[in-house]
Amino acid sequence: MEIVEEGPIQEPNVDSDKVRMLVEDIISDGGQLRNRDLLRRFLLSAVSIVGEDLDRLNLKILTSALVELRRAFDVFQPYRSQRKVTVFGSARTPLDHPSALMARELTASLREHQWLTVTGGGPGIMRAAALGAGPNGHVGVGIRLPFEAVPEDVEEAGPRVEMKYFFTRKVMLVKESDGFVSLPGGLGTLDETFELLTLMQTGKAQLAPLVLLHPLERPFWNDLVEFIAKTLLPGGYISSSDLALVSIHDTVQDATDELLAFYTNYCSMRWVGNQLVLRLKNLPSTVELASLNREFSHICTSGSIAPTEASAQERSEDDALDQERLALTFNRTDFGNLRRLIDALNGFSRKALPQPT
């Protein structure tokens, strides 16, 4: 799941010709660099800090965040083309607890489909998920906490990166994955789950399946889901379509099916000007497309949902040129119904959250 980036890249306001010349020299020495515009912006931002006499704490945060993210990018680089699932859950859960057993079974199941598991690299649910995925199927993104010990056999859990800040850790747990599963947990699990929902609801991250998973005999998520459906929705705090962004399941098989089904036909999305382009394995038939336009015309500000060709920018970047494309002038607000459109393109029905009575 890529963090969504829209609009032109703006360079920092740097008045010094000396600084600009220095940056251009650095870029030129780099040879045939890709993304030169982004590198220029990055270097200008970094060099311009020298004359600003930043507070020491602010500078430490900037430096540590950069170092942590750079290290994490290196850890994930070998897995860029592999589907990934991030598993959230309590660090306090014993490994023989039903929730931990589900986490282990789930990641073992997804490993058979060549999915990589990403966790917070800690004990409890995270450790169970890592064990199910195996050392070649798991990456841990740990956080340094005085009260949370790193598992003793961490070397057997695959690659791992340690983070100082929760916000850099969250970036990696969200950015790298194509699906998410939240098992029972405390404040941290709820925070991660709701932040992810917020990112998808506001379009700040690509849509992806988010599964709330719990054992049938211990239905952890039911009260929370009931609160959402019976309090937030009638109060006007969310829209009814927002409920499509999450599903609740009590079996590993259903959770696995939910994650895999999202990519039955759908591959990814990208903004091209004011058009949202959905990249697919196969285009819908003429009859199916007409049906989609009848059902989802309300999420378009103009025009219709229609096939399109790869844009010049996509071609220049060799971006998913082997995939088919549908384009729509999306209203940029109704991401729940956009998720339903993707479900329709995938041709499967989801287990809906309970509606308020």
Image (spheres, rainbow, N blue to C red):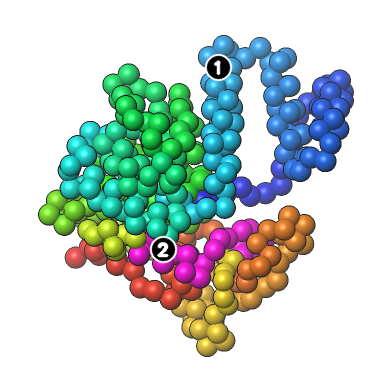
Which range is magenta? 257-277
The answer to whether residue 242 of the structure is visible from this angle is: no
Q: Which mark is residue 60?
A: 1
Tell me the SS state at disc 2: helix
Of residues 1 and 131, which is closer to you in this image?
131
Q: Amino acid at mark 2?
A: Leu
Label 1: how many Cα within 10 Å (few below 14, some 14–19, many 20+):
few
Classify 11 as above or below 334: above
Q: Which mark is residue 346?
A: none
Quarter of the view holding residue 21: top right
Residue at x 39%, y 74% (from the top left corner)? 348
Residue positioned most to the bottom: 287
Q: Is residue 148 left or right of residue 342?
A: left
For marks 2 and 1, give the CA distance.
41 Å
Residue at x 18%, y 53% (from the top left corner)? 215
Q: Is residue 45 left or right of residue 304?
A: right
Find disc 2 in the rendering and name its residue.
Answer: 260
Residue at x 52%, y 53% (from the top left corner)? 82
